[in-house]
Amino acid sequence: MKRKVLVGVTGGIAAYKSCYLVSALVKLGCDVHVLMTDHAREFVSAMTFETLSHNPVITNMFRRDREWEVEHVSLAKSSEVIVVAPATANFFAKVAHGICDDMLTTTYLASSAPKILCPAMNTGMYEDAVFQENLAKVRASGAEILSPVTGRLACGDVGVGKMVEPDEIVEAVKRALALRLDFAGKRVLVTAGATVEEIDGVRYLSNHSSGKMGAAIAERFADRGATVTLVAGNMTVKPADNISEVIRVRSTHDLYEAVTSRAEAVDYVVMAAAPADYTPVRPFAQKVKSDRLTLELVKTEDVAAAVGRIKGAGTKLVIFSAETEDLLVNAKGKLERKNADLVVANDVTQEGAGFGVDTNIVTMIDRDGGVYPYEKMTKIEVADAILDRLRTL
């Protein structure tokens, strides 16, 4: 499940840096919600943050164009960390003295989540005794203060007051969330989606795979620090922004070439795609218009088995086994035949475990014979469970 981060933006010129901050947090895999003050909207538009965060931006305490909810309480409870960047002298004065006259200050004071504040202002304001009193009071309340740095300010002065860079704020968020980057430095290849085998100029053979499971696995590997290449066939979902490389393929042969040419250079190969098992021996160049059509089919390449043959000793191979009967017997057989390290098996006849849905019910089997059944979970949760299991191999 994505970690929810609330980014508050107040009215300072450094608000433009918060665009980079939001983008970086999204790429990290966080669910980012932006709350802007009226003054912040004079510097950056709400549309910019909505585009970057993929969530509606909250700017007003009294909007009625969404389902009713005590929104500041909802945000305060659901946010795992609150970042205010930039945080102006006005904002510090309000929260230091418990003034809640806008959505940001109201939500801030209602939340018990970790808080990260990034002051940004003129040097004179920052060094003013009253501001320093407010700063000390807010710091004493438990907020983490990322102190401003010295540099050229918007007013032309050179001095302290410049907001820290977004990368430093992201690192503070990671610490606050205790994000796991347990696959940092690892190279991963994930396949997803369905392949297509041409019959004629307009028809093809394929299957019902949506690519959702493979996309979720690729996303969580990237969230947890890996460098991910996604080899994607037909998919109904968009790959996550934090995936390093997306290679589009159409046929099973295309998939075979893309995977086998890269498998020896990675630490993990996860075969979540659903390749077409058969391809026409002689596809027709033009649309067939006869009343009857007979096709001669031949088996396509077994991509997972090919990886099992060529993978190095340090490469872990994960395969999937979608079954309609004898789940464990068939899955164990595939694990052995394809020289895999982990098989993720599911009975596609179960409700919530078939193609195209957002959930799955899986049993994992490792090469040492361990069998690990799981209850119905979202595909993101299944992806995390797969990664957690890989850490034990």
Image (cartoon, rainbow, N blue to C red):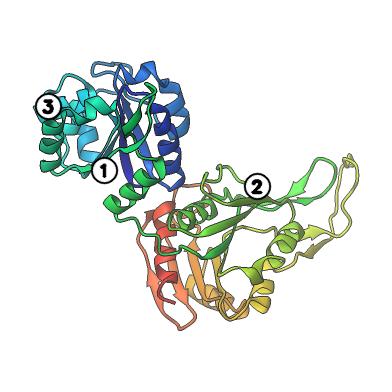
Q: Label 1's element?
A: strand
Crowd around label 1: few <14 · some 14–19 · many ≥20 (10 Å): many
Compared with residue 266, is residue 246 higher up or lower down, i.e. above or below? above
The residue where tag 1 is placed is 81
Residue at mark 2 to residue at mark 1: CA–CA distance: 37 Å
The residue closer to the viewer here, 35 or 293, is: 35
The residue closer to the viewer here, 388 or 272, is: 388
Residue at mark 1 to residue at mark 3: CA–CA distance: 27 Å
The residue where tag 3 is placed is 130
Compared with residue 170, is residue 363 higher up or lower down, i.e. above or below? below
Locate the C terminus and report the quarter of the image it occupies. bottom left
- Image side of residue 329 versus residue 12, left or right: right
Crowd around label 3: few <14 · some 14–19 · many ≥20 (10 Å): few
Mark before the other along the chain sequence, 1 or 3: 1
The number of numbered discs placed on residues in the rendered structure image is 3
Q: From this viewpoint, which residue is outermost toward the front?
A: 158
Mark before the other along the chain sequence, 3 or 2: 3
Residue sitting at x 19%, y 32%: 108
- Could you say where residue 10 lies in the image, as x and y percent from the top left? 30, 25
